[in-house]
Every structure is written in structure tokens, then in C-alpha cells.
Amino acid sequence: MDLVEAHGTGTRLGDPIEAQALLGTYGQDRPARRPLWLGSVKSNIGHTQAAAGVAGVIKVVQAMRHGLMPRSLHVDAPSSHVDWSAGAVSLLTEGREWTRTDRPLRAGVSSFGASGTNAHLILEEAPAQVEPAVVEPARAAWVLSARGGPALRRQAARLAGWVREHEQAPVGAVGWSLFQHRSQLPDRAVVLGRDRDELLAGLAALAEGRSHSGVVTGTASRGGASVVFVFPGRGRSGSGWGGACSPRAPPSPPGSRSASGPSSPGCPTR
């Protein structure tokens, strides 16, 4: 344990009891050069009542993130009501560097209620994140779409320029982003390739309007599905809704029809 964020309200009764408890636990069997450091966020923002505990948690998490133990303000001298020689505990009168050594950083956060509810939380630094190795697919597909052939060719040229400027961009990640985060417009092309050079060659052919073995183009059809509004008339408030809307609505497009009776059994709806 490196640090304890104390409840630390600054009272003559509560602070000595809390300090003596820390001296008798975390303060024992520690080298003098590595005491338990003690601070309280109440010296910065006062007592936040019901939020006092979470304020201490936020302080400790940020201290771990920035590698710095913040100092407690307005500390002139340690309290004379505490036997500080009983263990290795020191007040944070100055900010101190806090970095990982041969073990993760650890800190305790105390929050005590007037009703006798005492909480002590132990926080430990999260393990260092190891970036996973990028595994490129054996064959990548880059999907492009636009409205019209000229726009599609311009899209291919822009993408090729971006890929040349960002040489470290993984081809698999580029393909995923093109598929997941681009609008699906009618005129489409798929550029296939085993590596960056093959994909760039396909983009160049598409941008110039040339045929290429790794480029497939086509136009997407909308299909026969369309949106249908159904007024089932269930409930007293819904009765007659469809009839009230019909005279005000524009003429129905070709292919649509009205249904005056219930749907036939097994008719799929969604």
C-alpha cells in the first residue's frame, strides 16, 4: 500500500482515531524510506457530504493516471493528538512522484458516516495494456459506393491518395471502416487484394475507368420491400385511425393497396 486517501475531516476526535488505526495496520513493518503517505481531498474542496467517498476515489484514480500524489493543503504540522512514532505514516505536505516499481500502485480510500457506516476501498493500478498484434487478412475487400460512375471514380482516387499518405494504416481496418461507416449508395465497387499494393492498383484502375481483375462494380437494387403503415384499431383510442387519415393522405403510389379486413393467418409482418 502506497497511499491512503483519509476521511480526514480535521476534527480533534475523528482524525486521531483514523490516524492511529492506519499506523497500527498499514504503518507497520515498513522501511522508513517508504512510509504510507496520507492525504485528504477535503483540504481542496471541503466536505462534500454524501459524495465525500467518491471524491476520494476520483482523486486516487487521477493520481494513478498522472503518476503524482497530490499534496494536502493547509497542513502546518502533524496533529499532536497522534503518536506518529507508532508506525511509518507521513502526511503529504508536498506533491510526490508516484510511479510503478516492481509491483502495481495501490491506495486505500476511507469514507466514514455519522451513523457508524465505515467504508474502506482498496484500489490497484490496472495492468499495463499490451497492444494486440495486427493480423492482416489473407485477402482484403474495400467497398466503395457513390451516386453515379464519375462520383465512384472520384471516390476511388481520393481513397488511393489517403492510403498513400497513411502508409501504416492496416488494410483490414480500412476495409472494415469502409464497410461499416460509409453510406451505401447505389453505384458500388469492391476492390480485392492480398496486400496494400494490389489494393492500390485496383483503386487506380477504378479511378481511371479501366477493367481490373481485382475490381467488381455494379448497381444495387432497392428490392421489393417497402414501408407499410398498419392501423389495427386495437383499443378504444385507436378505433378509426386509418379511416381518419385516408381522406387527407395523397393518392397511394402504384403497387400499394388498402386492406379492409384482418391479415390472413400466417401473413408475415414486421
Image: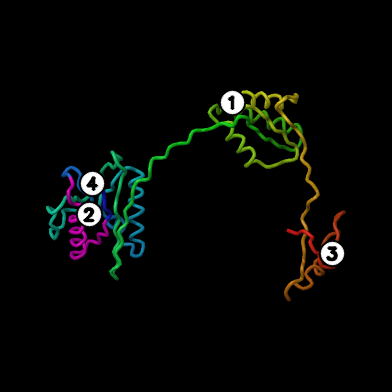
**Residue type marked 2:** His
The crowding category of the residue bearing disc 3, from other C-alpha atoms within 10 Å (few below 14, some 14 to 19, many at least 20), is few
Of pointers 1 and 2, the one earlier in the residue sequence: 2
The quadrant holding residue 48 is: bottom left
Q: Check residue 164 in the rendering and tell me which mark sits there, or answer none.
A: 1
**Which residue is label 3 attached to?**
259
- CA gap, disc 1 to disc 4? 51 Å
Image depth: mark 4 or mark 2 in front: 4
Of pointers 4 and 3, the one earlier in the residue sequence: 4
Q: Secondary structure at mark 2?
A: loop
The quadrant holding residue 118 is: bottom left
- CA gap, disc 1 to disc 2? 57 Å
**Residue type marked 4:** Glu
- CA gap, disc 3 to disc 2? 79 Å
Relative to residue 144, is residue 91 drawn left or right?
left
**Which residue is label 4 attached to?**
94
The relative height of residue 97 versus residue 91 in the rendered view (above or below) is above
